[in-house]
Amino acid sequence: MSRGSGSAADVYPPIAPVPAGTARPFWSIMIPVYNCAHYLGTTLTSVLSQLPRDEEVQIEVIDDCSTRDDPAAVVAACGEGRVSYFRQPANVGPQANFTTCIQRARGEWVHILHGDDMVAPGFYRTLQHAAREHPGIGAAFCRSINVDAAGALVDFSELEADRPGVQENLIGRLAIDNRIRFPTIAVKRETYERLGGFHPALFHSADWDMWKRVAIAVPVWYEPAALAVYRLHDQSDTSSLMQTGANIADARHAIEIARAYLPPADREALTRRARRYHGLYAIELAEEMIERGSWRSAVAQVREGVRCWPSVRIAPAVVQLALPALRRLSTRSRVVPSS
């Protein structure tokens, strides 16, 4: 995908090549943080334990002007003198902070690892081997281990393939929903230089938009071993956005943005399937919220789900959701408080 003048790609922030003469390690491990310092020590330990002290590597924490904690202190305490720290002069938002990670990276390959996620043993060795053995690839990702706030196993991401290899027609699946968790993917810096940074108008879906662009632009390697750890917790941006339906609204925006670069022959079909998927996904989230008694959040999800897929075919799902909700409300209204 080009960044030609006047194209839709011009909205993506430019990524300049690394200046000539700059030392280029293989890895730039860039760790964006914002008010998650209590997890950062674990994240740094997971990285440092995989990289010998004599290996040249760039590891840098990029702080989006945290207000409730002190990531710099964690870097000083846990970084073993191998981790640098950069603080934004003002809060720029997650997508701009991710782009700063790329712009400051000087390695051949860039791994953006959120400050509350981790890597499992073998992540860097395995993906570096794939990149060395297959120099034509421009990105590589693996299966993820999903854990809760305390680090307990929740589940694993869906298996994309039984064996390692370049993914055929990845965009055909990725255009429907985001199948790549952020900590699982590493991207060649040259790929980012070609595509630009993260879309400035997206927040929840900025990574999904990026991985779609990557999948169209370069061959992408997949490693079926679960080598990255994705943390699910109530304080995450994803959880907070679900309360207002902003997660689905942002996904709808990302779907429309993708129209500009999806393969022309498949563009309309993939767009319809993506809108349908996220419309029904919103109804599923609403059901979970009703079970927890989060009625306002459930209504927000239904509203955004219908906006995402304004079709009569979503009506049965809404009705199926409404009936148990009404029964639940009716049961609650009949409960008489004890005196």
Image: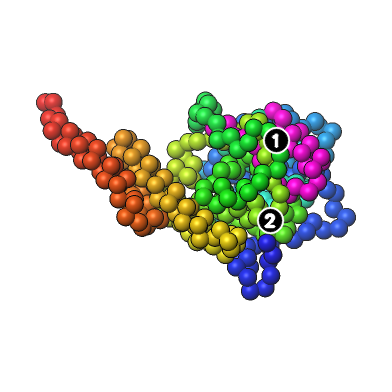
Q: Considering the numbered disc 1 on the image, is that residue within a helix, a strand or a loop?
A: loop
Badge 1 or badge 2: first in the primary sequence: 1
Residue with the mark numbered 1 = 164
Q: Quadrant of residue 5?
A: bottom right
Q: At x 34% / y 52%, what residue is drawn?
A: 313
Residue with the mark numbered 2 = 217
How far across and how far down the image is residue 321, in percent? 29, 42
Q: Nearer the viewer, residue 22 or 329?
A: 329
Locate the C terminus and report the quarter of the image it occupies.
top left
| Residue positioned most to the front | 265
Q: Considering the numbered disc 2 on the image, is that residue within a helix, a strand or a loop?
A: helix
Q: Is residue 131 magenta?
A: yes
Q: Residues within 10 Å of mark 2 (few under 14, many from 20)?
A: some
Callout 1 touching callout 2 (CB < 8 Å): no
Q: Residues within 10 Å of mark 1 (few under 14, many from 20)?
A: some
The amino acid sitting under disc 2 is Ala
